[in-house]
């Protein structure tokens, strides 16, 4: 454990709106709610640091500046002498609230948060920290806040023991695991408590605590490791977060001693039912299991001639009696394909496997679908699977850890990317969006949510790069409210994290606003994807995957580049989309430029909508992106003395690495395209 840990977006100063005045907490009926203790602790911490008071009973002689209460408490308080006007306003409106929702009212110098549960009060408390500099500030509020997504979950790809290739955290760029050390749970869970607090402040309500690629040590968490799992669940429970476990489909064999894991075998079914019963007996509010099956070497139902509905329903019927959920990942494709066969298309795989199974998954199954058809690239179309299973609960999977977006060595604020995904209209403008579908909005829709791969570890800044904390923050905020402006969320994070320094806030916004586009500028162009070094996926390698079995090709030759995924002449992938997108992507005239090479193989001289050719676009964007990355180093000099020195130094070091890497991307890709096309840069810039 490090001696210095960044407070991220919950520094002491951020508590001032809560702790500077008198806080009244009235929560009749919540005595057994473990989250209420966390609310009390937050109030007392804020009051002790900022000179305020914390009350548990109404005192007319000590008017409250903040009231946190349940509907029953609000009724009692509204009838008491000297009740603030904000209390009366809240009582008059009294909206119906879900278990996680809250009503926020501010008027005449008093702020009231009303919620039915400890979770709602906790979420409302953190909303209060976001909305103003002090509870007695000017202005009025009357807002009902309800999460759009019922499930807002983080998956940790943490190993109990370091993997010889992937290390302790697979695709982790922030040090070791927060949970596991030397094959077991850490004794000191102080950092875990702090992490749970950060997640709850953004509305995250579920967490999976081990890698989806389940190795031998992690497999035993299901049996021998329940005490460790229960200790973690106890920490997260206090912050309204349910704990989940990634399990191996082969567990009946690897830890159960059976000779098969066939989902239709009665002994296998009994084993899973008994295993689930043991887990819930130890952890009554356990959330359920996460499963990666028949994917990249992980065992699954295909070995027995069964399909994914058979496999998922096996586990669903074991967890359903306990109120649990099975998150079954749809990341299934042939990772041993022949690169010579241009009819095989990895992008098609998830739809081909899962669309025919719609309606066969039990209610306890949530199909977890990556937001794009490939693998968290800087630019991909939205996965057609999300539109193809109206009878199945779905969760869209995002990647907070920056595997293909700079690995937390590069500034790459992903809020705008996720916002585009969540707002994407699956059946055309004005129709249901990705957020609508996974939230279960609409006739016959079934609720799922948003799941993302965490970017946190035991690094002193939680996320390796201090500015990568913004992605963790934005994930929770956009899962709760997809309609939020991602740049407003960025400014929210900046204000909470770095305080009221307007000049610093402006500088940070300039560094981070547009950073996703800048990263795209100097990496893989026009949606073609990958072009990274195989294995670790950091830095350029244009042909790195071109002749491998992984199915991530660009098919560049002397005449052109891109993958023909049309119905007319290609793999037919465009046909997996509903109208209008199946035709938008099919046509060169209507396909968006930023996805051109994902859907089409075109000549280098193909003219884009802005009048430039494909090859000139590559030259221009790569020079522009590398220049912008270099300018960040100079821009950051203006933050020196305005942020803590260790934070400034870490960011400076990483910005220098980003600038170096961007130059390497620029030079390798420009050189590659020049040598393949023979077309010089129109501006005569140096290309090697």
Image: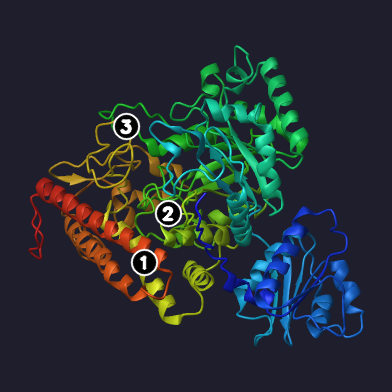
Give the mark toward the camera: 2 or 1: 2
Numbered circle sitting on residue 659: none
Disc 1 crowd, CA 10 A, few/some/many (<14, 14-19, 20+): some
Q: Please provide percent x and percent y for residue 564.
A: 29, 42
Give the mark toward the camera: 1 or 3: 1
Q: Of the residues under marks 3 and 2, which one precedes in the sequence?
A: 3
Examine the image and state in which quarter residue 536 appears.
top left
Residue 444 showing in the rendered view: no
Q: Please provide percent x and percent y for residue 233.
A: 68, 43
- Is the image coloured rainbow, by chain, by secondary structure, or in one colour? rainbow
Q: Circle 3 — which element?
A: loop
Where does label 3 land, which residue? 343
Q: Nearer the viewer, residue 325 or 187?
A: 187
Examine the image and state in which quarter residue 279 appears.
top right
Q: Of the residues under marks 2 and 1, which one precedes in the sequence?
A: 2
Q: Circle 2 — which element?
A: loop
Q: Is residue 282 left or right of residue 499?
A: right
Disc 2 crowd, CA 10 A, few/some/many (<14, 14-19, 20+): many
- Distance of label 1 from label 3 (alpha carbons): 36 Å
Residue 191 showing in the rendered view: yes
Q: Circle 1 — which element?
A: loop
- Distance of label 3 from label 2 (alpha carbons): 41 Å
Where does label 2 land, which residue? 464
Looking at the image, is 432 positioned above or below residue 1?
below
Q: Please provide percent x and percent y for residue 191.
A: 58, 51
Q: Residue at x 35, y 41 (%)?
A: 567
Give the mark toward the camera: 3 or 2: 2
Where does label 1 land, which residue? 514
């Amino acid at each position: 454990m490090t001696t210095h840990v960044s407070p991220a977006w919950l520094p002491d100063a951020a508590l001032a709106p809560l702790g500077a005045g008198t806080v009244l907490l009235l929560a009749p009926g919540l005595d057994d709610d473990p989250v209420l203790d966390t609310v009390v602790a937050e109030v007392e911490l804020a009051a002790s640091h900022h000179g305020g008071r914390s009350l548990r009973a109404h005192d007319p002689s000590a008017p409250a500046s903040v009231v946190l209460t349940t509907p029953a408490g609000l009724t009692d308080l509204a009838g008491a002498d000297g009740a603030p006007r904000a209390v009366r306003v809240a009582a008059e409106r009294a909206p119906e609230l879900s278990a996680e929702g809250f009503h926020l009212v501010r008027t005449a110098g008093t702020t009231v948060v009303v919620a039915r549960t400890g979770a709602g009060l906790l979420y409302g408390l953190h909303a209060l920290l976001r909305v103003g500099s002090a509870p007695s500030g000017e202005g009025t509020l009357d807002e009902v806040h309800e999460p759009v997504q019922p499930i807002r979950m983080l998956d940790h790809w943490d190993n109990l023991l370091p993997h010889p290739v992937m290390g302790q955290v697979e695709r982790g760029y922030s040090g070791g695991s927060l949970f596991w050390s030397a094959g077991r749970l850490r004794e000191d869970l102080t950092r875990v408590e702090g992490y749970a607090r950060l997640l709850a402040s953004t509305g995250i309500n579920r967490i999976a605590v081990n890698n989806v690629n389940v190795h031998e040590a992690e497999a035993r968490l299901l049996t021998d490791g329940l005490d460790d799992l229960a200790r973690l669940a106890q920490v997260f429970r206090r912050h309204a977060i349910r704990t989940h476990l990634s399990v191996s489909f082969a567990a009946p064999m690897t830890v159960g001693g059976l000779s098969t894991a066939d989902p239709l075998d009665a002994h296998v079914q009994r084993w899973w039912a008994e295993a689930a019963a043991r887990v819930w007996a130890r952890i009554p509010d356990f959330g359920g299991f996460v499963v990666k099956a028949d994917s990249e070497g992980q065992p699954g139902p295909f070995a027995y001639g069964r399909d994914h509905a058979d496999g998922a329903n096996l586990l669903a019927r074991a967890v359903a009696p306990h109120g649990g959920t099975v998150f079954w990942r749809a990341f299934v494709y042939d990772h041993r394909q022949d690169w010579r066969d241009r009819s095989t298309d990895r992008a098609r795989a998830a739809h081909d496997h899962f669309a025919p199974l719609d309606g066969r998954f039990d209610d306890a199954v949530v199909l977890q679908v990556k937001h794009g058809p490939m693998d968290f690239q800087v630019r991909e179309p939205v996965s057609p699977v999300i539109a193809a299973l109206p009878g199945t609960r779905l969760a869209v999977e995002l990647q907070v850890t920056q595997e293909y977006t700079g690995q937390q060595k590069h500034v790459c604020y992903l809020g705008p990317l996720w916002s585009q995904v969540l707002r994407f209209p699956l059946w055309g403008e004005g129709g249901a969006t990705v957020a609508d579908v996974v939230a279960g909005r609409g006739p016959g829709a079934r609720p799922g949510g948003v799941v993302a791969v965490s970017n946190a570890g035991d690094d002193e800044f939680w996320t390796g790069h201090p500015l990568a904390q913004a992605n963790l923050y934005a994930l929770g905020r956009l899962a709760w409210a997809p309609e939020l402006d991602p740049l407003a969320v960025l400014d929210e994070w900046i204000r909470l994290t770095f305080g009221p320094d307007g000049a610093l806030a402006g500088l940070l916004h300039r560094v981070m606003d547009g950073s996703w586009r800048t990263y795209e500028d100097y990496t893989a162009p026009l949606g073609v994807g990958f072009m990274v070094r195989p294995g670790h996926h950091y830095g350029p390698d244009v042909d790195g995957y071109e002749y491998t079995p992984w199915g991530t090709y660009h098919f560049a030759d002397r005449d052109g580049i891109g993958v023909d995924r049309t119905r007319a002449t290609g793999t037919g992938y465009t046909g997996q989309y509903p109208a209008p997108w199946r035709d938008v992507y099919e046509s060169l005239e209507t396909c968006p430029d930023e996805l051109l090479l994902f859907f089409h193989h075109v000549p280098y001289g193909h003219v884009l909508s802005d009048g430039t050719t494909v090859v000139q676009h590559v030259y221009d964007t790569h020079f522009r992106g590398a220049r912008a990355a270099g300018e960040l180093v100079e821009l950051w000099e203006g933050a020196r003395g305005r942020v803590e020195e260790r934070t400034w130094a870490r960011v400076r070091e990483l910005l220098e690495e980003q600038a170096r890497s961007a130059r390497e991307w620029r030079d390798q890709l420009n050189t590659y395209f020049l040598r393949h096309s023979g077309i010089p840069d129109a501006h005569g810039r140096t290309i090697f």
